[in-house]
Amino acid sequence: EMTNDKDADNGVGEGAVCARCGAPAKLACPKCVELKLPKAISVFCTQECFKAAWGEHKKVHSPPADAWLYCTKKGKGRSDVMPDFNWTGPLRPDRIAPKREIPAHIPRPDYFKDGIPRKEVESRQQSIAPIYNAEDKAGIRAACELGRKVLDLARAACRPGVTTDEIDRIVHEATIEGGAYPSPYNYYNYPKSVCTSVNEVICHGIPDARELQSGDIVNVDVSVYLNGYHGDLNETFVVGEVDEPSKKLVKCAHDCMMKALNACKPGVRYRDLGDIITAHAKTQGFSVVRTYCGHGVGEHFHCAPNIPHYAGNKAVGVMKEGHIFTVEPMINAGGWRDTMWPDGWTAVTTDGARSAQFEHTVLVTKDGIDILTARTPTSPKLWWE
């Protein structure tokens, strides 16, 4: 039913004409009013005219396929209005672009179709960390090396005025050019090809229309699926002129990761890495996120072992030659607690303070580890280098 001209907010106004027949308009479509659509398409002279127009008119309520919209429902939904939320810091979500295409020649993981990684969920690798053979190691190494190239390209784009959506475009295109599938794409319905986590975002930030600003820090988390194997890495970059506390936080996150990696070798308990990471973070006055962990990676995007980064954790298992996993501590300038934005993906600090993270994928060797996602001589320098 239409709202009529007796309603204070009927949205008709003086001199408006019927969208169907051009007669003076007296009624407004309530859905159009709710969506704040222009009067030229949303007002009518009578209920009869409205009903006659309905078959065609209702199409204006659906956004065009190329519309930029806010992400909702863990990637499944879109909205034309920013969701209400008790935002914890200054950052806000912006509109996201329509999904990018995956060319037909790129091999796709099972979750490409409906968002559910069934093979991963059902694999015994969820409880038992796989020991990879030489062929698997070579495949995972190749994926990690491509991931490194892609992340280095993304780093070069992290400048004031560049949107995180543009970083997504660069990552998406470089991954496909390398013959790979961007692992995050449609994983549990995640809508993009990379995660871009700005300022108070801890992880899983969705690339959108917001431009990076001088003073921001941004984590770019790249994962690629190449010839049946995943590689995973991330780094946090400073954008333009960044304050000293933020730079200190970024370096601390990097150093926490490296101190943990330096302890890795066969026989070391996975639970011990959290003690090493927390001890260093505490010396700098920072805290360690507890909700998100390092993980096995290779044949699946996420599998055993599970590697928490905080002290006193109860992770099971010891490192064995042939294990492959990530270490990826998230370090907060304030408290360790996190909460989730209404998009169902973006994890933020509850106090709005900034967060930084670094991640490598590593292979356990007979007397240490091999960093499969290692920086190369051509990798762009980190701020302190």
Image (cartoon, rainbow, N blue to C red):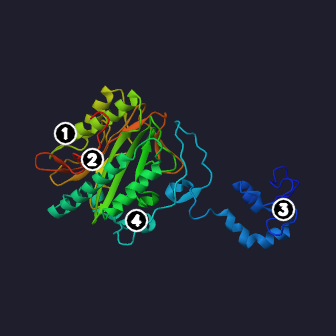
Give the x, y percent position of residue 175: 34, 59
Residue furthest left as drawn: 366
Give the alpha-carbon distance from disc 4 to disc 2, as whole Å: 24 Å
Mark nearer the N terminus (4 vs 3): 3
Give the x, y percent position of residue 241: 41, 32
Give the alpha-carbon distance from disc 2 to disc 1, as whole Å: 12 Å
Disc 4: which residue: 111
Mark nearer the N terminus (2 vs 1): 1
Name the residue rendered at 52%, 60% in the picture: 98
Name the residue rendered at 19%, 58% in the picture: 131
Q: Is residue 255 above or below residue 366?
A: above
| Mark 4 element type | helix
Disc 1: which residue: 262
Residue 154 visible, this angle: yes
In the displayed structure, does residue 59 sit left or right of residue 15?
left
Q: Is residue 262 above or below residue 151?
A: above
Give the alpha-carbon distance from disc 3 to disc 2, as whole Å: 62 Å
Kind of residue at badge 3: Val
Kind of residue at badge 1: Asn
Crowding around mark 4 (Cα neighbors within 10 Å: few <14, some 14 to 19, many 20+) is some
Q: Please give the label number shown on residue 17.
A: 3
What is the total number of numbered labels drawn onto the structure image?
Answer: 4
Mark nearer the N terminus (1 vs 3): 3
